[in-house]
Amino acid sequence: MTIYQTLQKYKKRRPLFENSEEFSFFVKNRELLRHVPRFEFLSNTEDDEFNIIRANIIINSYFNKKTIETEISNLSNEYDLNKLEKGRLLNILKERLSDLPYMIYNNSKIYVPIFSLPVNLIYSKDPEKLLTYPYSLLKSDYYESVIDPFDVYGPSLFDSYFTRLVNVCDNGKEVGFFNYDTNTIYIVNCQGRLDVKIVLFDKYIKHPMTNHMLERLRPVVEAYFNNNRQQFVDALYDNNFISLKMHSMLCQDNNK
């Protein structure tokens, strides 16, 4: 059993992920994944919280796509877009999209990460083009334009308003993210895939310490990046993420 499996096995009881906003959003909207067939498999991933986070990124991407298309259509009914100054058009649209999640990539807002950066620039900077051919085809005939956002945008996709994850630190190749809902560190690689899940707080801790979390998490993630097993176990203990008993258990078997 690895360190990570041991931490998972002996984790302290906590509020069920099934009661979180993340899970509720997924259950309510997962049928929308059929509109992005490439990722429809994520609709059956309710026992894996990281895949639920990924699924919600896809769902929100689809929501954003439909919202922007609807809003630019509404604006075309309210204004003569041929006469409306471009800056004003973008300001009006920006106000209407203010509640939508997005990410920053190459200094540009990405609202629809299931599309490439060039296509996203149409949605964010030239939205009026969505009303004319060939861009109007994106409304319904978009399947061939769908990319793998995790491959293309990598860890930066998780370090955005599309998730509730918090960036702890990175080593240039991987990023450590923390999820307050699950008290878990996710190590995400440059392909935007999960390498390791580190569950904090074992069942032998009576009162988990949850203050100054980011400050305490950094040494743990840095120790992981250093690939130093003892440093990693000590960092978990020194920062009150595992009990003395768990520290002893992990130190007894250096092959874990």
Image: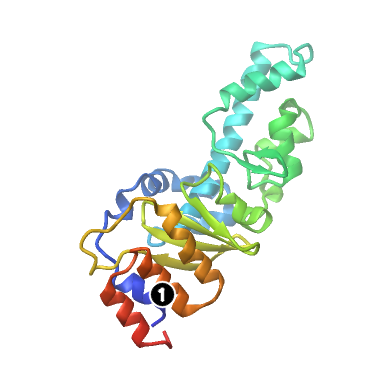
| Residue 148 occupies quadrant | bottom right
Give the percent coordinates (x, y) of residue 142: 68, 44
> In which quadrant of the rendered view does residue 64 lie?
top right
Q: Residue furthest front?
A: 238
Relative to 124, does residue 217 appear above or below in the rendering?
below
Q: In this view, does 136 lie to the left or right of 189?
A: right
Residue at (24% x, 62% y) in the render: 13
> Mark 1 highlights which residue?
233
* Residue 249 position (above or below residue 180): below
Q: Quadrant of the C terminus?
A: bottom left
Percent of width and height locating residue 125: 73, 30
**Residue 130 horizontal/vertical position (percent):** 72, 30
Residue at 69% of width from left, 11% of height from top? 79
130 to the left or right of 24: right
Q: Quadrant of the N terminus?
A: bottom left
Q: Residue at x 37, y 63 (%)?
A: 239
User: Viewer-proximal residue, 15 or 166?
Assistant: 166
In the rendered structure, the answer to whether residue 138 lies left or right of residue 174 reads right
Front-most of residues 114 and 86: 86
